[in-house]
Structures are given as C-alpha cells and as structure tokens.
Image (cartoon, rainbow, N blue to C red):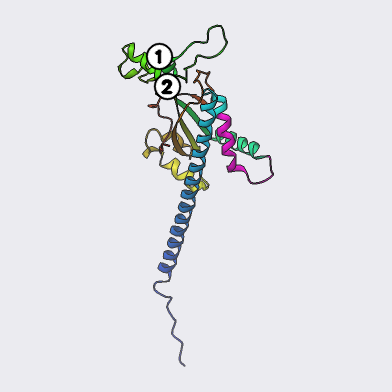
Amino acid sequence: MEHAAAVPPPRHAGTAALEFMLAGMLLLAASIATVETMYWHQMRHLAYLALIEAARAGATSHGEPGAIARAFARAMRARHAAGQPGQAATRQQHAWNRQQARTGLPAWRIAILQPGPTAFANHGVANRGLRRPPRIRNDYQAEQHAQRLAQGWPGGAGPRSGLDIFQANTLRLRLVYRLAPLSPWLGALLRASAALAQACARPAWRQGLLPIRLELEMDMQSDPALWPARPDVSYGDARDCDGLTAAASG
C-alpha cells in the first residue's frame, strides 16, 4: 500500500510574511511622514499670514500688544473654520487652552523685537501731562535723523539701542508657534528624541510639539508707543531662545 509523502511547508513562508509586515510598516511610516510634512507647511504658511495681519495691526495702532494679539488670533481662526459657523474663535481658544494645560507651554507667543525699551530710551518722547505711554515720533524722520547726527551719534544710532530713527520706526515681530502633530506617533518620537534636539527646541520636543519660528518687519504707520507687556505679546530680545527650530524672514 502506497502512502502519500508529506509535503513540507514552503521554506520561505515565514520570511515572506516578515518582509510583507516590514514593508507595510515602512509604507505606513512614509505615509504618516508625508501627511505630517504637509500639515506642518500648511500651518507654517497660515501662521506667517497671521503674523502679517498682526504686524499690520501693530503698525497702525502704535504697536499696541492687544491689537497685535487680536489680529493674530483672528487670522489663525481659519484652522478651526470647519463646523458650526461663528464658533471658530471658541474652538480655537479651547484647543490652545487644552494644549497649554497638557504641555505647560503656551501655544504661541509674539515678541516685539523692535522698537524695544532701549529704543524708547534713545528716541522716545514723553507725553507730559497725559496718561499715555512714551512714544517715538513717526513724522519728520529725516529731520530727526539729522538732529541725531548733529548730536554726535555715529550714524544717528542711539547709544543704548544701536538703532537710528528709521529703525526705531520699524516694527519687528517674532512669532513662536508650537504645533501639536496630527499623529501621536510623531509626538512620541519627538519626546524620545528631545535629548538630541538643539537647546532651543528641547522644551517643545519634550512635550511632543513641533516649534515654528517666524520673524517679520514692517514700517510703522503711527507713532510707536511703549506699552505694558501681555502674556502672549511682550517685548523681547533678538538673542532670546524660546524653544525654536525653524526661522523665516518676510
């Protein structure tokens, strides 16, 4: 009586399954990376447009931090426009509040790099008898520059600020925007890699956030004034490090 010989399993069946699984994981990782990259660029572009609106508001409102903050937040609402009309501002604020509560870092901050307190010390005019902040005159800048030269200021630059009257009438803003990735996998990767990040980026990476840094200059269209700082908009130094990685100038 003849017996059928047992057929051995394919030699490479296990290897093929492993290769298929690895290929699937690589494809998934590549897809996530593509989506995250597109999202980062979209949000960076939106943040830059919002910073332009913030600078315009500041240029026409004497550099008032509240006007800068409101204009930026209003322009960023496009990120939360989907859903019930008229609720974008509420959804946006809730999202920012949740992120700050979870990470301990504000979602965004704008620093007024120029003109700063030292520029007002050199070029400012006190509002005597008025309860208004010190200001820098926006008119007759050529005449003011000639006066500074006559005072012996090299290049018309103030001894404390190093800025001439034209630079003191230029609004320079820096935005720090901390973006939460769409995928929790990327957030986990950032946290795990925080020790390898630059010192400026490390605080954001530790919380699984992608930091975006943007700077913008715009000529003032009103007298710059020295205002009290706000948590979201305050005077800063260009040398400050605020958890940033990428820079762009406009």
Quarter in which the C terminus is drawn: top left
Query: Which image quadrant for residue 212?
Result: top left
The answer to whether the residues at label 1 and label 2 have Cβ atoms under 8 Å apart is yes
Q: Which residue carries the number 2 mark?
A: 168
**Residue farthest toward the top in the current orientation of the protein:** 129
Q: Which residues are magenta?
A: 69-86
245 and 207: which is toward the camera: 245
Q: Which amino acid type corresponds to the residue marked 1 in the rendered image? A: Asn
Q: Does 244 appear above or below 170?
A: below
Q: Secondary structure at mark 2?
A: helix
Q: Which residue carries the number 1 mark?
A: 122
Q: Which amino acid type corresponds to the residue marked 2 in the rendered image? A: Ala
- Residue 43 position within the rendered picture, expressed as x and y whole percent measured from the top left: 51, 43
- Residue 96 position within the rendered picture, expressed as x and y whole percent measured from the top left: 58, 35
Q: Does 201 appear above or below 144?
A: below
Q: CA distance from mark 1 to mark 2?
A: 9 Å
Number of residues whose C-alpha sits closer than 10 Å to that of mark 1, classed few (under 14), some (14–19) or many (20 or more): many
Q: Is residue 43 magenta?
A: no
Q: Does 186 appear above or below 170?
A: below
- Residue 11 position within the rendered picture, expressed as x and y whole percent measured from the top left: 39, 73
**Residue farthest toward the bottom in the current orientation of the protein:** 1
At horizontal 36% and vertical 39% (from top left) the residue drawn is 196
- Residue 211 position within the rendered picture, expressed as x and y whole percent measured from the top left: 45, 38
At horizontal 44% and vertical 17% (from top left) the residue drawn is 117
At horizontal 51% and vertical 39% (from top left) the residue drawn is 49
Q: Which mark is residue 108?
A: none
Is residue 105 in view from this perspective?
Answer: no
At horizontal 57% and vertical 32% (from top left) the residue drawn is 71
